[in-house]
Image: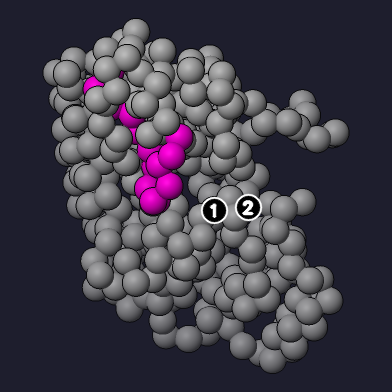
Amino acid sequence: MKKTVACMLIFVMLFGFAFSGASCAEGKKLSVVTTIFPIYDWVREIAGDSDVEITMLLDTGVDLHSYQSTAQDILKIASCDVFVYVGGESDDWVEGALAGAPNPDRVVVNLLEALGDDIVAEELVEGMEAEEEEGENEEAVEYDEHVWLSLRNAQKLVKALADALSEADPDRAEAYAANADAYIEKLAALDAEYAAAREGADFDTILFGDRFPFRYLADDYDLDYYAAFAGCSAESEASFETIVFLAGKVDELGLTTVLTIEGTDHRIAETIVENTQAKDAKVLSLDSMQSVTAGDVQSGATYLGAMEGNLDTLKQALSK
C-alpha cells in the first residue's frame, strides 16, 4: 500500500486523542477536512458566510500521487466533523486512517463513490507509455482519480458535499443548499462555454507531451486524445518511440499545440515539437490543480478561475 504512516506513532497519538474527550463536533464551528484543493474550494463555496473551519491537507504543492500523510494529518481527520477525499489508488492510506481514528459522528465523502457509475477506468491509448504492473495488482482496474477536472462531475459532487455538510450541521442545511445551488449554476454556465468552444473548434483532438489527467474533460466534450503517459503514471521519461509517434500525430492531424500540465518541466512536449516537420507548434499548459499551495489559496486561487484559464488554453489548442 502506498504512502503509509508509522503505525506505532499513529496509535500512540490517536490513543491519547481518543481518551482526551476532544471532539470538533462538540464545538461551535463545523470542521471540514479535505485532501485536495478543488474539494477545499467547493466546500468554501458551499459554506459561504457560515462559520466553517476548512482544512486542506495537500497544501504544499505535492500532488495527490506523491502525498505522504503525517500523524498530524491523521489527527485532523480523527477530530473533524466532515472528511472528504478522492478515493482512488493514491488515497489508499485513507482506509487505514479512518479505521485507526474512529469517530461515529464524522461524515465521510469519497468522491469516486459519490459519482458511482460516472467514474471511468484509466485507459492506455495508442502511443502511450505503459507502466509495468507488479504481481497481484497486474489485473486490477485502476480508476481515473481526476474526477474534479470535469465541470459536470463537479456539479454532482458539490451537491453531494452540500448534503454532507447538512448532515453534519442540520441547523444550516438551508444555507448550504442555497449556496450549492448558486455555485452549481456557475459551474453549469462555464460547462456551456466549454461546449460552445468545442462546437466551434477546428480540431477534435488534443495531444499531451505529459501525463494526461483530463480524461473526464475529454469525455465531456467528445475530444480524442493522445498522450505520453496515463494520468496517474509515475513515469517521467518518454521513449524514442513515444516521441516519434506523438510528433507524427501532430504532423498527421495538423495540430498547432502540444499540451502539458502545470509545472516548469516541459522537455517532453518541447522534444515532440522539435521532431515535427514544421517545428512550430506551441507548448501550452492546462492546470490540473494538483500542485496548488496554501500560498496560492491566499493569493485568490479558485476552482472556477483555474477552469476558466483551462478553457482559454483549450480554445487555442483546438484552433488552427
Q: Over which residues does the magenta segment extend? A: 255-268
Q: Residues within 10 Å of mark 1 (few under 14, many from 20)?
A: many
Q: Quadrant of residue 12?
A: bottom right
Reply above or below: 12 against 227. Answer: below
Disc 2 residue type? Asp
| Rendered-image quadrant of the C terminus | top left
Residue 130, visible in the rendered structure: yes
Disc 1 residue type? Leu
Please tell me whether mark 1 sits on a helix, a strand or a loop.
loop
> Picture coordinates of residue 301 (x, y %)?
27, 61
Name the one closer to the observer, 305 or 23. 305
* Residue at the spot 77% in from the left edge and 26% down from the top edge: 139
Report if the CB atoms under discs 2 and 1 are less than 8 Å apart. yes
Name the one closer to the observer, 313 or 115. 313
Q: Residues within 10 Å of mark 2 (few under 14, many from 20)?
A: many
**Residue 27 part of the magenta-drawn span:** no
**Mark 1 highlights which residue?**
64
**Residue 260 part of the magenta-drawn span:** yes
Q: Is residue 195 left or right of residue 129?
A: left
> Picture coordinates of residue 268 (x, y %)?
45, 35
Q: Quadrant of residue 30?
A: bottom left
Reply above or below: 27 against 294. Answer: below
Reply above or below: 170 against 277. Answer: below
Q: Which mark is residue 273?
A: none
**Mark 2 highlights which residue?**
91
Please tell me whether mark 2 sits on a helix, a strand or a loop.
helix
